Amino acid sequence: MDIQNSCAACPLYHKENLMRLGVDLENTDYVITLAGNPNTGKSTVFNNLTGLRQHTGNWPGKTVTRAEGAYSYGGKRYKVVDLPGTYSLLSTSVDEEVARDFILFGRPNVTVIVADATRLERNLNLALQILEITDRAILCLNLMDEARRNHIEINVRALSRELGIPVIAASARSKQGMEELLAAIEEVASGKYVCRPRRTKNQPANLKHAISVVTEKINEVFSDLPNVSWVALRLLEGDQSIIDAIRSGDLGLLKQDLPSTLSENADSSKRKLPTEKEREEILSAANTERWNLGLNFHDAVIETIYSEASAVARKTVSISGSRPYSLDLKIDKIVTSRWLGFPIMFLLLAGVFWITVSGANYPSGLLFSLLVDKLHPLLKELTMAAHFPWWLSGVLIDGAYLSMAWVISVMLPPMAIFFPLFTLLEDFGYLPRVAFNMDNLFRKAGAHGKQALTMSMGFGCNAAGVVAARVIDSPRERLIAIITNNFSLCNGRWPTQILIATIFIGAAVPAGMAGIVSAGAVVGVALLGIFLSLIVSWGLSKTVLKGEASTFSLELPPYRPPRIWQTLYTSLIDRTIFVLWRAIIFAIPAGIIIWLVGNVKIDGISLAEYFIDWSNPLAFVFGLNGVILLAYIIAIPANEIVIPTILMLTVLMTGMPDVGDGAGVMFDAASINQTRDILHAGGWTTLTAVNLMLFSLLHNPCSTTIFTIYKETRSLKWTMFSTFLPLVMGFAVCFLTTLFWSLMHQVI
């Protein structure tokens, strides 16, 4: 077929459908889409093409992330859309619907299929499906360096002849083949290269007949519908979204408008729209043919595609030397084994925490010295010189600024250590093994195996973990993952866990073991969170969210040498700075509230003192105190400010001299010993510390996570449920711990 020269010259339905599918076509000559299996390096190809000229959002009406970017080449501007990674277009998961609809109805100028060269036969299954619905495609054969390392040879020219499209050998991680890919995209988009894509040849005779019957019916009603054979196949498969589109009076993406070119100057108002009877005749024909095909029809379709992919692979792929991935298989036998998988996972988790705890102390002290010890007095002097009222100086400097300074000094160093370590494990290929190890446990709990991945993301940020639940297709299991993600000990709660464990748990053992024991206590709380996540998932799946756990395909990617510098850049810019900025935005107003409750007084007593005196009797029942309750209410916007709020309120209540800058002012103690003295003066015991660590794990999500839950669920009911369930559990666990503690002391 003729290739359109630009979006401006495309039929009107092409432009309208692209905009309906969420693509901004402003100043765009061509629309390019990237498709492929998960773990093929598609995102790396996308980043190489677009650089920093990209943004993300949701597909219209879907909780599936869309990445969109742009680049210029040869004087033309290209819009690039990264489709969700998927193994097939033949089922009806959200990801697969998005990918299929965009290629089929959006009709991008070029579809770049990113395939894993080390697993070509498996990747060809998706490639052949895509070639059934578009005449404009390129195969980007990525990970060629990995293929060579594992003695896999691919005849690129033969593969191009077999598929009838350009095939580009690439290693996107090292940017090899990217120039060739840009040139191929330009040739296919402009029409210099006319693709002749391979179509499935070995379909059963009865399937060919059924497709031809339904195709004829569709053509009678929708004469200009693209890729009619594919639509016919989907109707025969019983694809509900396609059936609804045909049956609906408003056909949505299937609605075809007349071309906008001057040569076809027809009056669209006189065009005859399909009647309900005509639409029902199409569905009736598809239903009749579906029954004629028998119950094994879907299996026959799948087997045809698999045999086609296998035939192409046999002609183009050869393996020499040792068995591919022999080293990877040996490593997997260890890290995914029944006996060693979990101990290794726990040791790695403990190692990451220990490095984070040990490495964050010194830079955190430097930042605090700069932002608080030096800058804070300077800012106070400036406000005095400018004759600010005492209350305005207090709100802005002692409240908003000190809150921001605390969050930066306490939160930035551990994040700058944790996120790169986490990203290195992800880049190396270990995190999918974590999901593999946890899959059986989550399945027994009635949840989805991919919840292990969302849980892992929650250790960095619960809001990010909630968003990551989009990878779960089942709405029921996605909701379970969202509700339980708060049980992952997020980055904002580490400072509380680390400090309290160091003061009360580490102090109970010899100094040489204090660091190890403190880190072990933090890991223990994190493991408790995982255990409770499984328990609550099981409870939800047996009660309000009943259902069977669904299966899923998890392809373990090959182990790859981590890209140190790119990992540092990605983790620091995309994760650390993003989460830090979010925390600062919420911490500033929280700091103002802290100052106000500590300094606004009624009859000489501050608002904080009123609340603490009132709530102390109730808090003591749970082994806590009123200071802790008020601190957690104030710290809903950002968990990072819990400890400075507790210290400020404790000093306010005890009247300790020579501590901080005055009543109601957030501060950091000069040393661990001074912090211990402040907390002991506030009546803290080891039981208080243990309960605080438990309550830090089990309390309501921060405001950002609550807002993210609402955005993902669009349900006030489930947002409130996700908010109050952990809070109720937190009080219950603290009460039981206090009761057990009292019984033990009575026995002793």
Image (cartoon, rainbow, N blue to C red):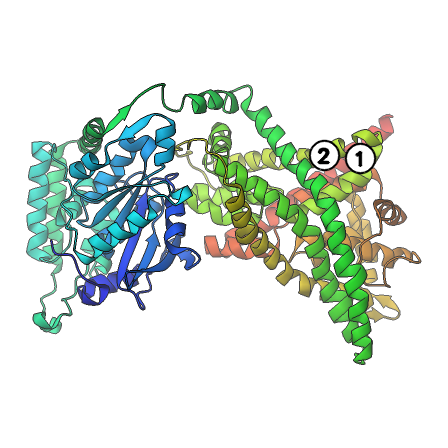
- The x and y percentages for residue 390 are 82, 75
**Residue nearest the observer in this picture, 273 or 130:** 130
Which residue position is annotated with label 1?
506
Q: Which of the two discs, 1 and 2, labels the residue nearer the N terminus?
A: 1
Q: Specify whether 490 is left or right of 621.
A: left
Tell me if residue 286 can be seen: yes
Number of labelled discs?
2
| Snapshot quadrant of residue 120 | top left
Residue, x 76% and y 68% (percent of image)? 397
Name the mark on residue 521: 2
Q: Specify whether 684 is left or right of 434.
A: right
- The x and y percentages for residue 491 are 63, 46
**Residue nearest the observer in this picture, 270 or 89:** 89
Q: Quadrant of the C terminus?
A: top right
- The x and y percentages for residue 739 are 78, 35
The residue type indicated by label 2 comes to Ala
**Residue nearest the observer in this picture, 739 or 126:** 126
Q: Specify whether 367 is left or right of 145.
A: right
At mark 2, the secondary structure is helix
Q: CA distance from mark 1 to mark 2?
A: 9 Å
- The x and y percentages for residue 567 are 52, 44
At mark 1, the secondary structure is helix
